[in-house]
Amino acid sequence: MNSILYHIKKIFSDSFTSSPQFYFSPGRINLIGEHIDYNDGYVMPAAIHHGIYYAIAPNQTTAIHFHAADFDEWFSVDISEIKKMSGWKNYVLSVVKEFVLLEKNISGFDCVFGGDIPRGSGMSSSAAVEGGLAMALNELFGCGLNRIELALLCQRAEHNFPGVQCGIMDQFANMMGKKDQVILLDCKDLSYQYFPLQLQNYSIVLINSMVHHTLAAGEYNVRRQQCGEGLKIISASSPVQSFRDIEQAADLLAYKTSMDELVYNRCLYVVEEIHRTKQAATLLQQNNLIAFGKLMFETHQGLSQLYQVSCPELDFLVEAAAADEAVIGARLMGGGFGGCTINLVQSNKLEKFVATITRSYQHKYGIIPEVYPVATSDGTAML
Ligand code: GLA
């Protein structure tokens, strides 16, 4: 048995008399389409084998007992007294709260959870925490929600107590992921398509800058607000209702003088990234990984210069990757301000690339970056 699952099982049986069900809830990668899930764009995530494990059982009372194994912390609360707290508690309590708001008939339970998604790494540990609990409560208390409804519930949960106005990508990938498949999700209407992830002689590897982005929730919400402000200005003088309606980036020039420069740059990035992701999806279907990888580098430029969600460490990692002939694409992944880069690398030169970039990152910043080879996984499910 996996050592995390073993640990969780042991804590559960040492602490409770109930007999638990076990769940695995995956983190995600995103190939391309960053910061556009909340801008009517397309994204290309996949669920991965890093995730959160849950052991959970109803306890026939109204008390909820949580143990967060990664922090070795307990927390108990009566279901009628759930309120906003801090840290990890907000993610789990907010999920329970959403079930209560839907008037689903849930009551007390015992729960131990923990996993192997480094926090703040951009692999969405928060959606994994939310999704595992939501799936478990849905099944254990017979709430009857489908996977997309659960993803939307988790997104609302993240907006509520944690206060991050996230898009739907992470929660959708967590619920709808399929092993060996990438999801092309249209965030405007949640229509989706699976593509086989055929990487030929290439591998995906994540490199963790070890800069924690956890404090960047405020900046994330500011980006969302700036995009809203830009779109409002654009739609006030045109039939455009969505960034999707803007056919090409050059069309934005007409609005340049009517908005703040920062807001204009955010909008420009969004329009470019929506087009880039559409193009990338076609290239992936044609197995043109070289051209796909070039678009990943372009995305990073946009995220760094126009959207300004990078940091010197991430820029360094992407530049170092670009300078290595084995790498055909690299960019920061997820919300930004730290966390991982995603790299598309020739498999037979992977080891050398990892050794070189580790050495140069350590030399520059005195930090050894963690490296994660990626394997895809199915969405959240009972084990
Ligand atoms: C975070 C959010 C997602 C998405 C990404 C950036 O992971 O939770 O909704 O916006 O950032 O693409």
Image (cartoon, helix red, strand yellow):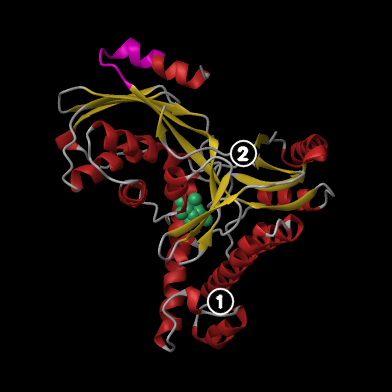
Please provide percent x and percent y for residue 58: 23, 25
Picture coordinates of residue 126 (x, y %)? 43, 41
Q: Nearer the viewer, residue 208 or 85?
A: 208
* Mark sitting on residue 210: 2
Q: Is residue 312 magenta?
A: no
Please state the horizontal and vertical placement of residue 177, each as a whole percent of the image: 49, 44
Quarter assignment of residue 265: bottom right
Q: As displayed, is residue 46 above or below residue 273? A: above
Q: Is 11 a magenta residue? A: yes
Q: Is residue 351 above or below residue 72?
A: below
- Residue at the spot x=29%, y=42% of the render? 94
73 to 204, vertically: above or below = above
For badge 2, the amino acid type reads Met
Q: Residue placed farthest to the top in the image? A: 14
Is 165 left, or right, of 108 in this rendering?
A: right
| Mark 1 CB lies closer than 8 A to ligand 1 | no
Which portion, as a residue range, is magenta? 10-20
Marks 2,1: beta carbons within 8 A: no
In the structure shown, which secondary structural element does the residue marked by tag 2 occupy? Answer: loop
Q: Name the residue under label 1.
A: 261
